[in-house]
Amino acid sequence: MAAGQLRAEASCPLCLGLFQEPVSIHCGHNFCRPCIERCWRSSRDSFPCPRCREAAPERSLRPNPELAGIIRIAQRLSLRGRAGAGQRLCPRHGEALKLFCEAEQRPVCRACRESPEHRLHAAVPIEEAAQEHKEKLQAHAQILRDRREKMLGLKAAEEGKSLDLLERVDAERQRVRSRVRELQQLLEGQERLLLARLAQLDRDIVQRQEESLGRLSAQLSAVGQQIQELEDKCRQPPWELLQDSRDILSRLEKQSAPEPVETPAELAEEPTGLPQENATLEEMLRKFQASLTLDPDTAHPRLALSEDGKCVRWEDARSAVPDLPARFDSSRCVLAREAFTCGRHYWEVQVGQGSAWALGVAKASVPRKGRLSVRPERGIWAVGRCGGQCQALTSPSVPIALPEAPQVVGVYLDYEGGRVAFLDARRRAPMFAYPAASFGGERLLALLCLGRGCRLRLCP
């Protein structure tokens, strides 16, 4: 009962809770500062006391520190008395927070519930409100867990995709390096070939110069001897000078038209060894000349062959020919009848003004069905022309620089040496030489590929 009386004396008559910042007004009654200020908010002329209704002409609020001390003692006593219940207490009324105000979303005690501040607000038991909020939080936690699982799956998929892309990039890097090494080897082979030819030309020039200088030296020595003989003759007495002068003059008159001699300047103006080289090349090519004919059983249905098997041309319409196993069905190609398994061979193909063609050497095992890849790794060594540019069909293709498009292309095959080379047959100018390769003992055949409107012919 004493605690109840203490609580009644320590409670604000407006909010019924323990005093918060207690103040005294003109009549001596005490109130919470927020409560009395809220009560007097609409008053302008007079300020009545909410308990005794005594009015004052002006606001007068005096802090009451003694009452504030009593309130603190009452709060400590109230908290100490209810600490064993394990409940939080209202800081204003000292009662257990057993209700939850849904309007302000905070726990309140029963005294707060009856106060004017919360009287019109909906309130539920705090356990019920806590359970409802717990269920909502658990639902959101489950949503977040599901989202985390989904994100972990996406992360794993992205890591796998990145790993796959990195492996592809590494494989492409290795492929590029391999192709660069192949090109380097190809260029080194071309460099060695060209440097060897230039070294031979240097030797030929030096040899011809030495031979010419030797002939000039011999002629100069002979002329010097004649001059010395004539000078000695002129110093003889008259009867000795006239004795055989007629024979000397007759001999000199016969030599009055001297043979032309080559001077170093004239030698420098001549082509540097090309006539001798071309003569040697002509002899070699004639020695290895091969006579070829085209095999109609391998020709694509759009290709038409001449009766002698030497000429092939593009046709706009497909021919009604049997689909033989040896016939190309997608690539416009044809093979020669004759196959090579040894030795060195040479033949020429007249390409004329054709703007799209390819020709060279192919293994007999090249596939005949489906699109044909004209590359050395597929068993084909060839050159071709497409869009006005001649190129070696390597991997990748290598442009061939020529002053103008060739009319006749020569093909040279050295089976044991693993060599395939091409030249402009009309100008006897080299076009391209493949690096040494191994043909694996397979049969090799001449291959012709034609573009739209093209016509090729084997020579002779």
Image (cartoon, grey):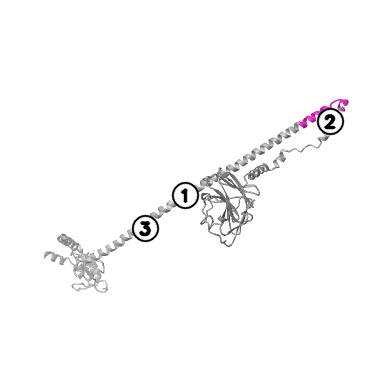
x%, y% of residue 257? 80, 37
- Residue 406 visible? The answer is no
Amino acid carrying label 3: it is: Leu
Q: Nearer the viewer, residue 173 or 294?
A: 294
Whether 37 is drawn above or below 457: the answer is: below
Q: Secondary structure at mark 1?
A: helix
Residue at 79% x, 29% y: name it: 228
Amino acid carrying label 1: it is: Arg
Instruction: Return the disc, 2 or 3, that comes first in the chain's sequence.
Output: 3
Task: Reply yes or no: does residue 241 show up in magenta.
Answer: yes
Residue denoted by label 1: 173
Q: Which residues are magenta?
A: 222-242
Residue denoted by label 3: 154
Residue denoted by label 2: 248
Residue 292: image tag: none
Whether 386 is drawn above or below 239: the answer is: below
